[in-house]
């Protein structure tokens, strides 16, 4: 009995001196950016035109034969597949701010040569959360949609 009490006290003491649980990192705020491949896009002084491949989850009914108690039974199950979806896009560059990974806004004149030499950009509806900016290469470019003027 004495050993059991001693063991219980040691366990309790271990819980009392346990390290504090670290705080969770903050959740990412704002819209998720879209990666746009510019390698096949056409860029002139005012627009970027190209195609964008995204993926969409599609549910599909699939039949399978299973063994139930020695008998073959055909069952239908639903599986989810990611299906590529290709869409065309045209971005009017005057509707966007071109921002570098470190948050500096570039003029359209300064950004055009960089856009033509960049195979991939991010497009966002608002300023990127700093969590996204931490994982970007230093020469990454982000197209951030300008806010429309407030109605009067």
Image: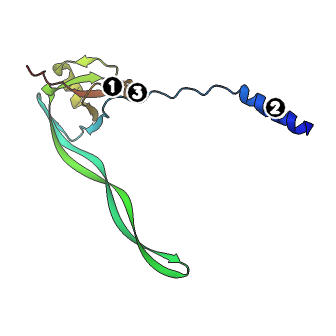
Give the left or right position of residue 115, taking residue 78 as reference.
left
**Which mark, residue 131?**
3
**Which mark, residue 10?**
2
From this view, report whether residue 63 is shown above or below residue 33.
below
Quarter holding the N terminus?
top right
Q: Secondary structure at mark 1?
A: loop
From this view, report whether residue 91 is shown above or below residue 147.
below
- Earlier along the polypeptide chain: callout 2 or callout 1? 2
Residue 48: give x, y in percent of width and height.
16, 34
Identify the image quadrant of residue 76: bottom left
Q: Is mark 1 in CB contact (under 8 Å) with mark 3?
A: no
Camera-near label (2 vs 3) is: 2
Identify the image quadrant of residue 29: top left
**Nearest to the observer: residue 68 or residue 28:** 68
The residue under the point 28% across, 52% down is 84
Give the left or right position of residue 78, taking residue 44 as reference.
right
Q: Secondary structure at mark 3?
A: helix
Residue 152: give x, y in percent of width and height.
7, 19
Give the distance between the C-alpha atoms of the residues marked 1 and 3, in whole angstroms.
17 Å
Q: Secondary structure at mark 2?
A: helix
Q: Which residue is mark 1?
A: 139
**Nearest to the observer: residue 16 or residue 127:** 16
């Amino acid at each position: 009995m004495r050993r059991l009490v001693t063991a219980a006290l040691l366990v309790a003491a271990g819980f009392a001196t346990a390290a504090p649980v670290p705080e969770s990192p903050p959740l990412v705020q704002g819209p998720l950016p879209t990666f746009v491949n510019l390698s096949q896009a056409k860029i002139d002084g005012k627009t970027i035109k190209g195609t964008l491949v995204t993926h969409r989850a599609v549910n599909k009914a699939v039949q399978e034969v299973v063994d139930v108690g020695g008998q073959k039974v055909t069952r239908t199950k639903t599986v989810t597949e990611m299906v590529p979806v290709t869409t065309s896009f045209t971005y009017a560059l005057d509707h966007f701010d071109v921002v570098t990974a470190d948050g500096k806004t570039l003029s359209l004149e300064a950004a055009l040569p960089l856009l033509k030499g960049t195979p991939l950009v991010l497009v966002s509806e608002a300023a990127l959360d700093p969590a996204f900016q931490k994982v970007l290469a230093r020469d990454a470019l982000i197209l951030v949609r300008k806010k429309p003027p407030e109605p009067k």
